[in-house]
Image (cartoon, grey):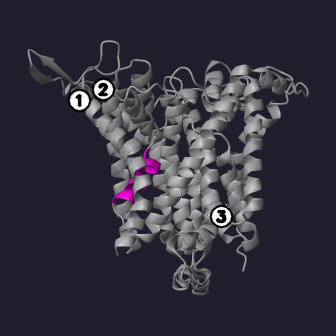
Amino acid sequence: MTRKNRLLKLVALGAYLFLYLPLFIVIVYSFNDSKLNAEWVGFTFKWYDKLFQNREMLSAAANSLIIATVSAAVATVLGTLAGMAMHQYRLKLLPGLVLAPIAMPDILMGVSLLLFFIMLNMSLGLISITLAHITFCIGFVALSVQARMTAIDRSLTEAARDLGATPWQCFRKITLPLLAPGIIAGALMAFTLSIDDFVITFFVAGVGSSTLPLQIYSMVKIAVTPEVNAISTLLMVLTLILITLTARLYPGALRS
Amino acid sequence: MQQKSWQQRLLTLPPMGYLLIFFAIPTLIMLFASFRYTGEYGGLAPWYSIENGTLAFDLTLENWQRLFETDIYLRLFFKSIGYALVTTLLCILLGYPLALMIARSQKKHRDLLLLLVILPFWSNFLVRIYAWMIIFSPNGALTQMINSLRDLLGLAPISIMYSATAVITCLVYVHLPFMVLPLYANLEKHNPALLDAAQDLGANRWRRFWRITWPLSLSGVYAGSILVFIPVLGMFAIPDLLGGTDGIMIANVIKQQFVESRDWPFGSVLSMVLTATAVLVVLLGAKIGQQGAR
């Protein structure tokens, strides 16, 4: 039962082109031996060389990795708790608190956290960025875990309890393994969102510390140079590897 | 029963505590800041003072009055709402056929086709804006091609960079997956037997679409529209990099108040208006969605 509709396929093809052509252009120009992103001059790796000699960029990359690892870890724990709670109990406040940060425009969280940190006399830097990243990551983990919870057969945990397992044993041996794909998907999402975040970081970073997106922003603000293409290409490759790894290790994790 | 509530607390309290501290309280602080005076060097002035042993509160409505003194800010708000509406509409126009095509393709291909929609979304946000900076740059291929065409027709060359066109194109590009995913989730559930029945009864392709597929998919359209509309309304990076002076949106002014002018109270006023608008849109969307479900 296939409905052949050429117009539909044509528009869809156009949409895919629209999605991929810009990224393709970025990748191609990262190997172009010209300062301008215009004419193709010749193949080169020099933009990558330049990138790896750029101290600021390297330290920003290190910052990004540290922040993303810590905030993904903390947000995964808190988000998993929230996701399980939202599935098991009829709560009013928690779902609202989990969903609101996702529903609001990023800039609002950025400026309100800036006011909050300044009010507490906290110096802005890696810690304030990490605390902010945890805040916006919790919701995504919680939703991923909650979706996975609904797929778990309740009779399994009930059977375990009937056979004398303690609540902890039941969680450790039944719920957690079954929940793993949801947790992994949530953690991956949190990690990527943290590495990717520009808007909120922009407000809570202060002057001393930079992350990759902040570094890219300041470079792009001044001039469009192929070095940005090189770092962009590397970031795309990193994300692709992460996604492929997750898909290999936990088939089904990406679907949720 | 006792044990159950102990478990419930263990699960609920840590995330709730964290979000109360780092989300709810900062939002309240922002509301409060909108009634405070600007400090001497920008930022915030103290909100109370003690003179001769009496406590005085230094709060004001001035910041809120300033919002209505000129029509600059309100016009910018409406302009941003306009941008968000146009972006949402374009996302529907482009995303609907895409979601429909995926939902109607063979089952084994669907996951891959959907993944291809999500994949660009996983690449860095700034990289995706940067890609359009290259495309729209004056010596980029697209601008050159358009201008050589215009030259043939005897028209003056144009620049797409730093215009509303550039901003909206990039807004659509970044937010398209938010439209496609909920639409696909909806369209995939449709029963093909309905379309067969309509065809047997003599309805042509157009009629089948408008009488069956479209009405059934409305909840997906609403969900996608909210997911696109709200982040676009509060977007500052795209107009900042692609918009120039003409293309700025309300979030650019908020950023300017907090970073360049350091007028935090007025920045808080604008942020609160944006918050209220976003909340209103979500509530409205939920209400329409409920009615649609009936």
Q: Camera-side residue: B211 or A25?
A: A25
N-terminal of the pair, mark 2 or mark 1, is 1
Work out whether A53 lies above or below A167.
above
Work out whether B94 lies above or below A174.
above
Magenta highlight: main SS: helix
Residue type indicated by callout 2? Pro
Measured in 3D between alpha carbons, the distance from the residue under mark 2 to the one under mark 3, in whole angstroms, is 44 Å
Measured in 3D between alpha carbons, the distance from the residue under mark 2 to the one under mark 1, in whole angstroms, is 7 Å
Circles 2 and 1: CB atoms closer than 8 Å: yes
Asked whether A95 falls inside the magenta stretch, the response is yes
The 10 Å Cα crowd at callout 1, few under 14, some 14 to 19, many 20 or more, is many
Q: Is residue A1 left or right of residue A143?
A: right
- Residue B2 seen from this side: yes
Q: Which residue is the site of mark 1?
A: B35
Q: What's the chain of the residue with tag 1?
A: B
Q: Which residue is the site of mark 2?
A: B265
Q: Which residues are magenta?
A: A93-104
Q: Which residue is the site of mark 3?
A: A255
Q: Is residue A10 left or right of residue B232?
A: right
Residue type indicated by callout 1? Phe
Q: Camera-side residue: B10 or B99?
A: B10
SS class, disc 1: loop
The 10 Å Cα crowd at callout 3, few under 14, some 14 to 19, many 20 or more, is few
- Image location of residue A136, percent across then percent down: 49, 45
